Amino acid sequence: MDQELEKIRDQQKESWNRFSPGWKKWDDLMMDFLKPMGDEIVRLINPGINDDVLDIASGTGEPALTIAAMVKGGRVVATDISEDMLAITSENAKKLGLDNLETKVSDVCALPFDDHTFDAISCRFGFMFFPDMLLAAKEMARVLKPGGRIATSVWNGPEKNFWVTAIMGTINRNMDLPPPPPSAPSMFRCAKPGLIGDLFAEVGLKNITEKEITGKMNARTADVYWNMMTEVAAPFVAALSKADDAMKRKIKTEVYDLLAQKYPDGNVVIDSNALVIYAEK
């Protein structure tokens, strides 16, 4: 990677480490929210009992933990650029009594594994944040065994993910922030249908499929939604840090008003939509 991309990676590492306490605090709710996408990834790669599986951008541990419970004769290596997030993965694995899961801090663009090491690779919501997505795909293909399976999920467009736009749209309306360049890491960078599939094809993967998967964020209340999102979502916190107190109050009030309009009964259960892409080597 060039120096600019390495700088982005280092900033991301710092950010994920800084926000890891929030992810630990809200782990149950977030993992429930992301479970449908993880379940589809696991279904597609269909881990065998003796498989060696690589999970990339593991965060607090899913779907690596689910896979480790399936590959009792194999192993799972959970990787992330954030050592603090992986510490949560290790803690969760210990709670579940999983002794076949190991963690390794690593950059997806320079995976520290030999060619043809893994039977399958899972990557839930990592691609849109990788500084160099093509290099990441090349590295995944390199460490995958011939005949190996890979599945990843990315967020669909903003119009299908109100859980993001409720806050980010309100921030943008009030603060007139410049949008990120199309190629820069961001939530919806990979929303274009076929984008990840084209990357997989470019690195020699085949039998590529893409499927929409829906989920629900069961926040239940506006307070839970606001508190969770402002404790786990680095882009929101970064944007709000540029606002004075009056502007922060205005944005929060408008977000609560939006939620009240959309969920008049006060039950804040927000739909989400992702793409899950599968390929084979």
Image (cartoon, rainbow, N blue to C red):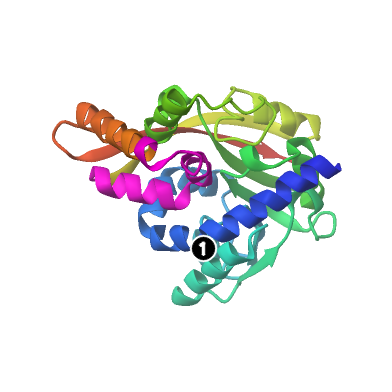
Q: From where the camera sits, is residue 69 visible?
A: yes
Percent across and percent down for residue 51 are 65, 61
- State which quadrant residue 17 falls in: bottom right
Instruction: Please state, as top left, top right, bottom left or bottom right, where the C terminus lies in the image.
Output: top right
Q: Is residue 57 magenta?
A: no
Given the current orientation, which residue lies at the most extreme left position?
Answer: 265
Q: Residue at x 61, y 47 (%)?
A: 123
Answer with left or right where residue 110 lies relative to residue 94.
Answer: right
- State which quadrant residue 129 falls in: top right
Q: Is residue 226 magenta?
A: yes
Can you say whether 94 is above or below 271 in the image? Answer: below
Q: Nearer the viewer, residue 113 or 231?
A: 231
The residue stretch that appears in magenta = 220-247
Q: Residue at x 50, y 29 (%)?
A: 156
Percent across and percent down for residue 209 are 60, 30
Q: Which residue is mark 1?
A: 65
Q: From where the camera sits, is residue 1 visible?
A: no
Percent across and percent down for residue 163 are 38, 36
- Under mark 1, the amino acid is Leu
Q: Nearer the viewer, residue 264 or 251?
A: 251
Q: Around disc 1, counting alpha carbons within 10 Å, would you say few (fewer than 14), some (14 to 19), or many (20 or more)?
A: many
- State which quadrant residue 87 falls in: bottom right
Can you say whether 266 is above or below 58 in the image? Answer: above
Question: Secondary structure beneath disc 1?
Answer: helix
Instruction: Please state, as top left, top right, bottom left or bottom right, where the N terminus lies in the image.
Output: top right
Name the chief secondary structure element in magenta.
Answer: helix
